[in-house]
Image (tube, rainbow, N blue to C red):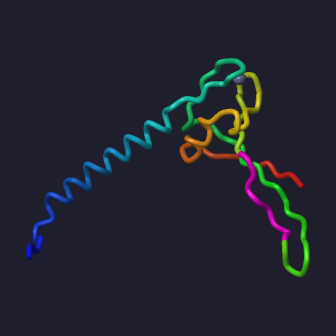
């Protein structure tokens, strides 16, 4: 039975892996989303998306009366067209790398 006593190689691999992960995150943040209407490109890490929420009416003794996450949308700041993630698959891919989001609440 071999017992590993020197972790030096693993630490180097861990550092290399972290550098690769950082590059991947940076790649997503600097990626662009293109507006299908006007062609304007938006840098993901400098943009915000819209998270919608929908309200579930109360029912029974303790059911409902709560907000649920709905769809994700993106508003082009050039032409002000709002894209739904359903029609723009890139939005789902980049959602964790946006600068932030605004909530849109509907009853
Ligand atoms: Zn646009």
Q: Position of residue 11 (x, y in %)?
A: 20, 59
Which SS does the magenta portion mostly show?
Answer: strand
Q: Is residue 15 left or right of residue 40?
A: left
Quarter of the image where ligand 1 sits? top right
Q: Is residue 61 above or below residue 73?
A: below
Out of 76 and 89, give the one closest to the viewer: 89
Q: Is residue 105 left or right of residue 9?
A: right
The span shown in magenta is: 64-71
Task: Specify the quadrant of the image occupied by residue 99.
Answer: top right
Q: Is residue 70 magenta?
A: yes
In the picture, the quarter occupied by the N terminus is: bottom left
In the picture, the quarter occupied by the C terminus is: bottom right
Tally of numbered discs: 0
Q: Is residue 12 left or right of residue 3?
A: right
Q: Position of residue 84 (x, y in %)?
A: 73, 37
Q: Residue furthest front?
A: 1
Q: Is residue 95 above or below residue 31?
A: below
Out of 82 and 86, give the one closest to the viewer: 86
Q: Position of residue 101 (x, y in %)?
A: 67, 46
Task: Specify the quadrant of the image occupied by residue 65.
Answer: bottom right
Q: Is residue 15 magenta?
A: no
The residue that appears at 91% across and 78% down in the rendered structure is 60
Q: Is residue 48 left or right of residue 82?
A: left
The residue that appears at 10% across and 74% down in the rendered structure is 3
Q: Residue furthest bottom?
A: 61
Q: Position of residue 17 (x, y in %)?
A: 29, 50
Q: Is residue 61 above or below residue 67?
A: below
The residue that appears at 54% across and 38% down in the rendered structure is 45
The residue that appears at 73% across and 33% down in the rendered structure is 83
């Amino acid at each position: 039975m071999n017992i590993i006593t020197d972790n030096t190689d693993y630490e180097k691999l861990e550092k290399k892996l972290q550098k690769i992960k950082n590059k991947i995150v940076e790649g997503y943040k600097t990626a662009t989303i293109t507006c299908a209407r006007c062609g304007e490109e938006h840098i993901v890490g400098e943009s915000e998306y819209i998270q919608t929420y929908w309200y579930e009416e109360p029912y029974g003794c303790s059911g409902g009366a709560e907000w649920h996450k709905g769809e994700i949308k993106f508003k082009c700041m050039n032409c002000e067209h709002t894209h739904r993630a359903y029609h723009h698959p890139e939005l789902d891919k980049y959602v964790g790398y946006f600068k932030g989001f605004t909530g849109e609440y509907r009853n």
